[in-house]
Image: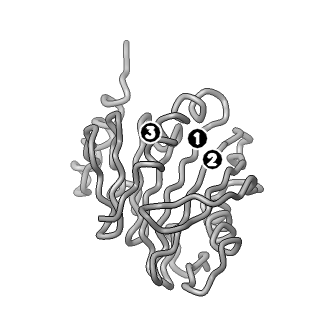
Amino acid sequence: MNITRRGLIAAGAGSALLGGCVAARLIEPGPYRVERAFTIRVTQSWSDVTPLARQEEGVHLLTRDGPALNQLYAASIEAGGALAFLPDRDTPRPRYRADMGDTEVVEFVIDSIAAWGYQAPESTNLRPQALAGAQGVRFDLTTRTQPGLEITGSGLVARNGDTLNLLLFLAPSEHYFGAYAAEIEAIMASATPA
């Protein structure tokens, strides 16, 4: 039996619809708007699984092969907002503050990844890079899942007034991160103000 990515996503979406939830939607190559903040351009089809993943306000989750294999977060987070969705609303989650410096913003992202349950996330290679016309910080990261799967990531954050715009890609170090590295570079470079 040959199972395709779209088949798996369609099966998950069908299950969600039967349960009364909103389904994922296919994002065709072209522009993808992130709130009223910025637009990215994708060169291949992605699935927007934001409704299925129950993200925080302003946080979108895209995937090519399913969230366990690759995750592209595109977010515009207001001051006081969070990147990490946690089902238990009583558990403290990292919150974005408008007065954070560049290093603190990267730490906010790393702390959010830890809140999702990833083990020992670390950022490296911080460097300047623009995001949608605003000066920002690009960084690499490594972490692992609780069972021990090594994860590699790439992030780009930039403040626009009191709002934090963010692109974050996470994927297993073996195969998936490298397979999409060129496309992620193109997506991060494509961001323009909305």
User: Within 10 angstroms of label 3, few (less than 14), some, or many (20 or more) residues?
Assistant: some
Please say if the residues under marks 2 and 1 sit with CB atoms less than 8 Å apart: yes
Q: Position of residue 8 (x, y in %)?
A: 36, 32
Closer mark to the observer between disc 2 and disc 1: 2
Q: Nearer the viewer, residue 91 or 163?
A: 163
Is residue 180 rendered to the left or right of residue 153?
Answer: left
Please say if the residues under marks 2 and 3 sit with CB atoms less than 8 Å apart: no
Rendered residue at 48%/79% (across/down): 81
Please say if the residues under marks 1 and 3 sit with CB atoms less than 8 Å apart: no
Q: Quadrant of the N terminus?
A: top left
Q: Position of residue 72 (x, y in %)?
A: 47, 49
Q: Secondary structure at mark 3?
A: loop
Type of the residue with mark 1? Ala
Q: Secondary structure at mark 1?
A: strand
Residue that lies at the very extreme toward the top in this rendered image:
1
Q: Quadrant of residue 20?
A: bottom left
User: Within 10 angstroms of label 1, few (less than 14), some, or many (20 or more) residues?
Assistant: many
Is residue 170 rendered to the left or right of residue 64?
Answer: right
Type of the residue with mark 3? Gly
Q: Quadrant of the C terminus?
A: bottom left
Real-space Cα separation, disc 2 to disc 3, in angstroms: 16 Å
Rendered residue at 57%/65% (across/down): 136
- The residue carrying mark 2 is 153
Label placed on residue 171: 1
Type of the residue with mark 2? Gly
Label placed on residue 66: 3
Q: Quadrant of residue 149?
A: top right
